[in-house]
Amino acid sequence: MASIDTGAATATSPGSSSRSLKGSLGVGAIVFMVVAAAAPLTVVGGGVPIAFLLGNGAGVPSMFVIAAVVLLLFSVGLSAMARYIPRPGAFFTYVGYGLGRPLGLGTAHLALLTYTMIQAAVYGLIGVLISSGVSDLGGPSIAWWVWALVIAAFTGILGYRHIELSSKVLGLLLIAEIGIVLILNIAIMVKGGAQGLSMASFEPSSVMSGAPGIGLMFAVAGFIGFEATAIFRNEAKDPDRTIPRATYAAVLLIGVFYAFSSWALVMAWGPDNVVAAAEKDPAGMIMATAQTYLGTWASTTVNVLLITSLFACILSFHNVISRYQHSMASATAMPSRLGTVHPNHLSPHVSSLVQSITAGLLIVVFAALGLDPELEVFAWFSGVATLGIVVLMALTCLAVLVYFRRNDIQAGLWRSVIAPALGFVGLITILVAVIWNFPTLIGGSQSLADFFFALVVAAVALGIVQVLIMRRRNVVAYESLTTAIAV
């Protein structure tokens, strides 16, 4: 995505309006938001046990290391290109500059689809967890979608206001969820685990056991959201330094945390028993581990923080989607009204309201169709998001390579060629694994998989067609788009 005006907001009085966002976010604040989107406790407590079961068992921690290495290589090229394209657009901008405006806008639509799908998936899970939690405490039995709508409303209020309010809320929630997992990890290490501490998870026999492709899929899914650092460019304190540092920090923090925590979970049950433990109760595995190694208080705390982790994920993606829409509107690719900025909060308030309405409508549609919030809403749409994010990153990595090849820019061989090329090979490998195992990820239905494949292709095609029509019928809009996404 791209914003035509990349400078500070021009609003100088409460009654004025600007189309440019403004803020003073530092590395820490941006990292908090994108790591919160990755929902660390949700991944460790929800995704990792399923990866044990369906993937390569005790070898899952190694998959997070592999994913982190590939994404760090991807980040090198992304950060290098960002120095020459100072626009807050992430995938939209980079693909547009590298591979052309039509594919750039197609990427923007795919990014919106991807982030909307992951947010929709999390609404299903948080709704059912709150509903069951209230019922277990003796409260009234309220449908999951009612709670999901309440969360959507609260998210909308925070998203409407200044971005720094959201970053503070996310920061507090993130510290709490990472803190409890680290305490659990330390307790497991101190007590020596079930079969002693070892590096069995990183041995070739463990890495290649079971279905490593599925394990890698779950690992990559755990990183969704890290690349959104670039979308906060205009709200960063020193974007040329803040954004690259935040990107590297996010990948390293997520990768190390997931690898360490999943390894600790393997040690807690033992390499020989971890798959059986996950099969018995994947959803309750993290709570059972906390109960065993820390006591009832920890199990209860994990249960509560799992809900706050999901909320942090929703709020973070709400902010990202709002800014994608704002950037696309500034580039004339969406209604101009979405590009306005609140004179006081300096937030994309109209875009935020539209995003809140979209989320609410999706929740209502899911409820009307009678979809199961866990097995269908969460499983299906998180699967689509995983597919979408890998396609987006592969296209962006290719765009980086093409951009530096076409332009005479001395960015260094490592940053402009070697690192992005290695990242591209890694991402294509991951994409093949995702496509091959996609039916399993969404419940085993090939027809449903084909539908979602078509949805991803349609999102890209929509952007391509939109640019071609704009070029023929609306020259003014096309020229504005050219300013935002040049080749």
Image (spheres, rainbow, N blue to C red):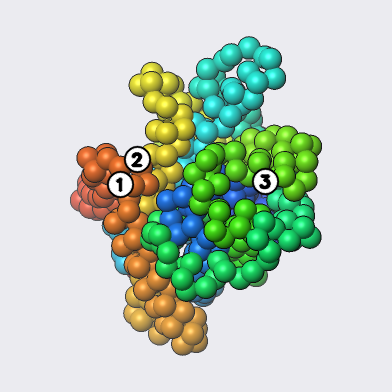
Earlier residue among tags 3 and 1: 3
Is residue 293 visible in the rendered image? The answer is yes
Image-based side of 208 in relation to 162, left or right = left
Q: What residue is disc 1 on?
A: 439
Image-based side of 94 in relation to 460, left or right = right
Q: CA distance from mark 2 to mark 3?
A: 27 Å
Q: Quadrant of the N terminus?
A: bottom left
Question: 21 or 416: which is nearer to us?
Answer: 416
Q: The residue tagged with tag 1: helix, strand or loop?
A: helix
- Residue 126 at x, y = what percent? 57, 32
- Residue 405 at x, y = what percent? 36, 81
Which amino acid type corresponds to the residue marked 2 in the rendered image? Gly
- Residue 75 at x, y = what percent? 51, 69
Q: CA distance from mark 1 to mark 2?
A: 6 Å
Q: The residue tagged with tag 3: helix, strand or loop?
A: helix
Q: What residue is disc 2 on?
A: 443
* Mark 2 closeness class: few <14, some 14–19, many ≥20 residues within 10 Å: some
Q: Dots 2 and 3: beta carbons under 8 Å?
A: no
Q: Dots 1 and 2: beta carbons under 8 Å?
A: yes
Q: CA distance from mark 3 to mark 1?
A: 30 Å
Is residue 17 visible in the rendered image? The answer is no
- The residue located at (23%, 52%) in the rendering is 468
Residue 289: give its label.
3
- Residue 465 at x, y = what percent? 23, 49
Residue 325: give its label.
none
- The residue located at (55%, 54%) in the rendering is 273
- The residue located at (36%, 42%) in the rendering is 442
